[in-house]
Image (spheres, rainbow, N blue to C red):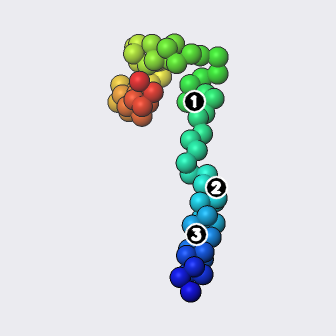
Amino acid sequence: MAILGSTILIRRRNKYADVETWSDEEIVPTRDERIPEGWTLEEFLNWLDGPVPEDWQEDQWELYKLSLEDLR
């Protein structure tokens, strides 16, 4: 009886050990879609550190820059 119980437990453990989990894999994006096409990260960050673009208000520009802080 003990052998039967042990065998069942071992089979259950092996069954769950073989299950693939997709959440363990981290997908690394090839590029950040927020950076304009053809720009490097460094070029984009330099642009963000520059003056307020024409047709932008100071508060809009600051909010936009804050939304991209994770790129630094």
* Residue type, label 3: Ile
Q: Who is closer to the viewer here, 20 or 41? A: 20
Query: Residue sitting at 63 percent across and 29 percent down?
Result: 30
Instruction: Give the structural element (helix, strand or loop) at label 2.
Output: loop
Mark with earlier residue (2, 3): 3
Give the mark toward the camera: 2 or 3: 3
- For the residues labelled 1 and 2, say whether their Cβ atoms are less than 8 Å apart: no
Question: Foreground residue, 12 or 4?
Answer: 4
Q: Position of residue 66 (x, y in %)?
A: 37, 31
- Asked which secondary structure carries label 3, the reply is helix
Secondary structure under tag 1 reads loop
Question: Is residue 68 rendered to the left or right of residue 5?
Answer: left
Image location of residue 47, percent across then percent down: 47, 15
Gap between marks 2 and 3 measured at Cα: 18 Å
Residue that mark 1 sits on: 32
Asked whether the viewer can see residue 64, the reply is no
Measure the C-alpha gap from mark 1 to mark 2.
28 Å
Whether the residues at callouts 3 and 1 have beta carbons within 8 Å, the answer is no
Instruction: Specify the amino acid type for callout 1.
Output: Asp
| CA neighbours of label 2 inside 10 A, class few (<14), some (14 to 19), many (20+) | few
Q: Amino acid at mark 2?
A: Glu
Q: Nearer the viewer, mark 3 or mark 1?
A: 3
Which is nearer the N-term, disc 1 or disc 2? 2
As drawn, 1 above or below 18: below
Residue topped by disc 2: 20
The quarter of the image holding the C terminus is top left
Residue at 49% in and 14% down = 42
Q: CA distance from mark 3 to mark 1?
A: 45 Å
Instruction: Specify which label sits upstream in the sequence, 3 or 1.
Output: 3
Instruction: Answer above or below: position of 10 versus 69.
Output: below
Q: Which residue is mark 3?
A: 10
Residue at (62%, 70%) from the top-left corner?
11
